[in-house]
Image (cartoon, grey):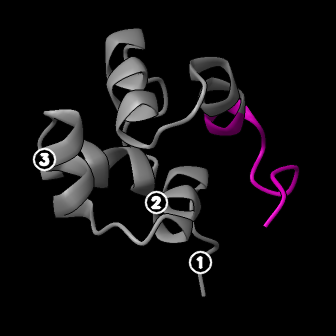
């Protein structure tokens, strides 16, 4: 079983679906899905800002979570 990405874990802890996060962040579900699957390994800073606001977290905290190696991110 594949380990969920940092974004998927954070989103899940907040009880949000990809659709709900997409609506809150004004991004597409495809963008959220691409980031979670690792298809977009370096999302634009504007995208991370939107996600951080939608997840009600600090930009720097989210940026760090998205750039850490999967085994370094706490569950």
Give the camera-side residue of 56 and 37: 56
Q: Residue furthest front?
A: 56
Q: Position of residue 45 (x, y in %)?
A: 42, 11
SS at mark 3 in the image: helix
Q: Which quadrant of the figure has residue 19?
A: bottom left
What's the mark number on residue 11?
Answer: 2
Seen at 51% across and 51% down, the residue is 7
SS at mark 2 in the image: helix
**Disc 2 to disc 3: CB gap under 8 Å:** no
Pointer 3 residue? 23
The quarter of the rendered structure image containing the N terminus is bottom right
Seen at 49% across and 70% down, the residue is 12
**Disc 1 to disc 2: CB gap under 8 Å:** no
Give the camera-side residue of 35 and 24: 24
> Counting residues from the N terminus, which is met first, the one under dot 3 or under dot 1?
1
Q: Position of residue 18 (x, y in %)?
A: 26, 62
Viewer-nearest of labels 1 and 2? Answer: 2
Q: What whole-number distance in Å separates the C-alpha atoms at marks 2 and 3? A: 13 Å
Seen at 16% across and 35% down, the residue is 27
Q: Position of residue 17 (x, y in %)?
A: 28, 69
The boundaries of the magenta stretch are 65-75
Q: Position of residue 41 (x, y in %)?
A: 48, 33
Pointer 1 residue? 2
From this view, report whether residue 15 is shown above or below residue 24: below
């Amino acid at each position: 079983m594949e380990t969920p990405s940092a974004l998927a874990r954070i989103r899940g802890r907040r009880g949000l679906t990809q659709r709900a996060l997409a609506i809150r962040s004004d991004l597409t579900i495809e963008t959220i899905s691409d980031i979670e699957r690792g298809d977009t390994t370096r999302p634009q800073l504007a995208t991370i800002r939107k996600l951080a606001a939608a997840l009600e977290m600090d930009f720097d905290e989210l940026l760090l979570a998205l750039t850490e190696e999967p085994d370094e991110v706490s569950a």
